[in-house]
Amino acid sequence: MSKRTAAVGSRCLPVKKDQNFAYNIYLEDSFGQLPERIKELEPENRKICIVTDSNVELLYAKEVQGLLAPCCREISIFVIQAGEEHKNLNEIQKLYEHLILQKLDRQDLLIALGGGVIGDMTGFAAATFLRGIRFVQIPTTLLSQVDSSIGGKTGVDFDNYKNMVGAFHQPSLVYMNINALMTLSEEQFACGMGEILKHGLIRDSSYYEWVIDHMSEIQDREIDTLFRMVEGSCKIKRQVVENDPTEKGERALLNFGHTIGHAIEKMKNFELLHGQCVALGTVAAAYISWKRGNLAEEEFYEIRDMNVGFDLPISFDSLRSEDIVEATKHDKKMESGKIKFVLLKGIGKAYVDTTVTEEEMLAAVNAMNADLWS
Ligand code: GLY
């Protein structure tokens, strides 16, 4: 894999809703600009707590702490064990205890340094500690850069129900070091690609085609291509959350692939990564869209095969299709007992449909169930 690390310059994508929130998303090629960027939050007399996980701690925590220490009054690091199984209220309680011991007040700042789990947990602690303090997202995975760090969804899992407890709380700043993507495993990188393909599929067919056309540069992690790809995806995500910050309408389209994806994730007991499950859910949703006549057969197969091209799964095993369909009934995106399923009317055009039947879901899930193939 050729991983060029040439300077790519900085980009700033301002996110603006109204007086309720406005913040900047910075794309950089190192953590070096962080002291300059964070100045806009006036941290000089403030305490900062960096929240990270046990993997990211070893890679970046000291560097980020060293860069930010001269910008603030006091800085501490709080480490959560890496892994979705730690995304729960027990860990949040330990974080509250740390913040109380460090005497953080309402003007102080949390920093989420890591992937989506850390971003969601830190955001949730920031939303609730002292009834709400500011926080900064420094996403280090592809998935968190293009999705979870933007838009203020925060929360934890509860009793195996994903993101069941949470709050909308917008970050005060998002800072991405695109070179952090070079240290991701192939699997983690692929999970981010699932979200990127999703953004194109629901909103922007030319971006989708661009991603497909640049598959080899993306897989080689060429920095300029990654920069353009992350920027393109962040622009789509930004536009959706500006229009609909609390998911009253359009934001639900971002849940494309999530109804069946979350069900598989739950049934697999979180053995598969979130991005892998959403990728499977995407194939299922595209299948239903095809069977309803919204997509041509070749469009469905292209969507499915892009998963293969970007190292994402198109099948699962060791699960009963019926159990997956049953698990969709516990999706938190239900409204008045109806599943809000996101389908495609074409590439780049998604809509919410509440009429998808169990039979349609079962057919889509059966088509991916490798146990039925022999
Ligand atoms: N990840 C979906 C959303 O932010 O709404």
Image (spheres, rainbow, N blue to C red):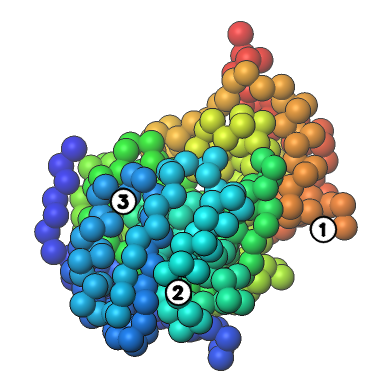
Q: Which residue is mark 1?
A: 335
Question: How far apart, in angstroms, are the residues tagged by discs 2 and 1?
Answer: 41 Å
Q: Residue at x 43, y 79 (%)?
A: 108
Q: How many marks?
A: 3
Q: Earlier in the sequence, mark 2 or mark 1?
A: 2
Amino acid carrying label 2: it is: Lys
Above or below: residue 365 compared with residue 211: above
Neighbour tally class for label 3: few under 14, some 14-19, many 20 plus, Cα within 10 Å: many
Mark 2 sits near ligand 1, with its Cβ under 8 Å away: no
Q: Earlier in the sequence, mark 3 or mark 1?
A: 3
Question: How far apart, in angstroms, are the residues tagged by discs 3 and 1?
Answer: 40 Å
> Toward the viewer: 273 or 374?
273
Q: Which residue is mark 2?
A: 103
Is 196 positioned to the left or the right of 290 in the image?
left
> Toward the viewer: 85 or 246?
85
- Screen quadrant of the C terminus: top right
- Screen quadrant of the N terminus: top left
